[in-house]
Amino acid sequence: YASAEWEDWLGGVIWHTISILTLMIEELLEELNSFPGREEALRKEFRWKNRTPMFYRPHLSTHAKHVAWLTDEVAPSVLHTYPAFDAKRAFALALVHDDPEIVTGDYTAGDKASMTKEQLQHIADEEVEAINTLAERFPKTLGGFSYEELLLDMVNLETIEAQVAKYMDRFDGYGEGV
C-alpha cells in the first residue's frame, strides 16, 4: 500500500520520463530529415502491396513512426526490467528498421512463410546489400549511433533494443492486418 505522496511522486517521475522519451523520438525524426530523399522513398513504398482487399495500406514512413511510438509506450516497462536498456537507441532502431526496403521493396511475413530456404537467403543477401547501399547514401550517424550498425542490429537482433523494436514492428503489423 503506497501513500498518496508516494503515488503523486511516482506519477510525476513516470510522466517526466515519458515526456523525455517522446522528445527523443522528435529529435531523431528531425535528424532523419537530413537524410536526402529518405522520407520521400519511404512514402513511395506501401506495405501489404500483395494483399487485397486492404482498406488501410500504410507506407513505410507511417509504419516506422508507429513502431517508434509503440516502443515509446513500452520503454518505461522495459527500463524497469532492463535498467541498461537504451531507449534512444531503441527509438532510432524503430525509425530505421525498414529502411533497407527503400531498396529491396517490402516482403511480408506471409510472403516469406511460403518461400524456400534459397529464396529466403536471397532476400537476406539483398537486405545486407541494401544496408551497404544506404550506409553510403545517407549520413553516417543517427542520434549518435552508427546508421549502418543500427540497420545491421535490426537484421541480427542481438540487442534488447533491437528485439523490442522488432516486437513492436510485429505488433504494428498485426494491427495493420486486422
Image (cartoon, rainbow, N blue to C red):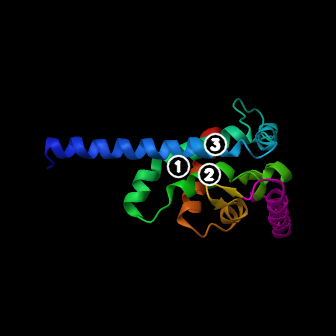
Name the secondary structure under disc 1.
Answer: helix
- Residue linked to disc 3: 29
Residue 8 lies, in percent from the top left, at 22, 40
State the image quarter where residue 57 is shown. top right
Q: Which mark is residue 89?
A: none
In the rendering, at what x and y percent does residue 94 appear? 62, 51
Q: Quarter-wise, where is residue 142 in the image?
A: bottom right
User: What residue span does the magenta drawing correspond to?
Assistant: 113-140
Query: Quarter of the image containing the C terminus?
Result: top right
Between 20 and 84, which is closer to the camera in this rendering? 20
Identity, as a three-letter code, of the amino acid under mark 1: Thr
Task: Identify residue for label 2.
Answer: 94
Q: Is residue 102 magenta?
A: no
Residue at left 81%, top 56%? 134
Q: CA distance from mark 1 to mark 3?
A: 14 Å
Residue holding disc 1 = 71
Foreground mark, 2 or 3, reads 3
The Cα–Cα distance between marks 2 and 3, rounded to whole angstroms, is 11 Å
